[in-house]
Amino acid sequence: MSDSRVRVLDESDWRIYRDLRLEALRESPDSVVGSREAESDHDEAFWRDLLREEPRFVAERDGQAVGIVGLHPAPDDPDVAEVLGLWVAPTMRGSRIAWELVAAATDRARDQGRTQLFFWVASDSGAAVAFASTFGFRPTSQRRTAPATEAATPQEEVAMVLPLVDDPSATKTPWH
C-alpha cells in the first residue's frame, strides 16, 4: 500500500514548489493560472517569497512530490480564504491526493479563524465541480472569466463556497 502525506512547504522547499508549479503549467495550461514561460524565469528569491507569503501544501506519495495547493487569504475580508493552484500529477489523479490537499488547506483556514473557504472552478468542468461538491463546496451565483492562463480561449469560472463554521443545515463532510 502506498503511503501519502500532505505538509506545508517552507521556504527551504522552494525547488519542490517551483518544479511542481512549472509541471502544472506545462501539463495543464488550460486549468492553471499563469504562464510557464514567465514563471520559469523567476529566481530563487521569488519562489522563497511565495512560500513565506501564504501557505502552500505539497502531497507526497512514497517520497515523491505529486501535488500542490495554496491557501490565499481574502485581502478585504479576514473571514474568507480561497483554495488556489490545486494540481495533482496525472498518474495520481483519482487516488485521493486532491482530497488530502484540499482537506489540509481547509484545516489551516479553519485554524486561522476563517468562516468561509472559496474555490473557483471552471463552469464547464464537470470533474472539478463534482470534486468540489463532493468535498462539501456549494456553487454560488458568482461568476468570472478565469484569470489569464495559457488557454486559447478564456473560461468562465464559478465560485464555490464551503462554510467552515457549524451550520446545522449544511451537508456534513468527512472532517466534521
Image (cartoon, rainbow, N blue to C red):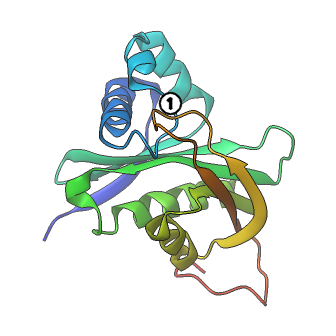
Which sits in the foreground, 144 or 167? 144
Q: Which quadrant holds residue 91?
A: bottom left
Question: In the shown orientation, is residue 64 left or right of residue 14?
Answer: left
Q: How many discs appear? A: 1
Which sits in the foreground, 66 or 11? 66
Residue depicted at x 67% and y 60%? 158
Q: Residues within 10 Å of mark 1 (few under 14, many from 20)?
A: many
In this picture, is 51 found above or below 135?
above
Residue extending furthest bottom?
Answer: 169
> Dot 1 corresponds to which residue?
34
Please identify the quadrant where the C terminus is shown: bottom right
Q: Position of residue 119 (x, y in %)?
A: 62, 57
In this picture, is 58 found above or below 61?
above
Question: In the shown orientation, is residue 45 left or right of residue 37?
Answer: right
Q: Position of residue 113 (x, y in %)?
A: 76, 56
Q: Is residue 113 visible?
A: no
Q: Which quadrant holds residue 25?
A: top left
Residue depicted at x 53% and y 63%? 124
Please identify the quadrant where the N terminus is shown: bottom left
Question: In the shown orientation, is residue 113 left or right of residue 64?
Answer: right
Question: In the shown orientation, is residue 66 left or right of residue 107?
Answer: left
Residue depicted at x 50% and y 60%? 102
The three-letter code of the residue at mark 1 reads Gly
Q: Position of residue 142 (x, y in %)?
A: 78, 59
Q: Which quadrant holds residue 159?
A: bottom right
In this picture, is 85 found above or below 93?
above
Q: Is residue 127 visible?
A: yes
Q: Position of residue 59 (x, y in %)?
A: 34, 51
Which sits in the foreground, 162 or 167? 162
Residue extending furthest right?
Answer: 76
Residue extending furthest left?
Answer: 1
Tell me the element at label 1.
loop
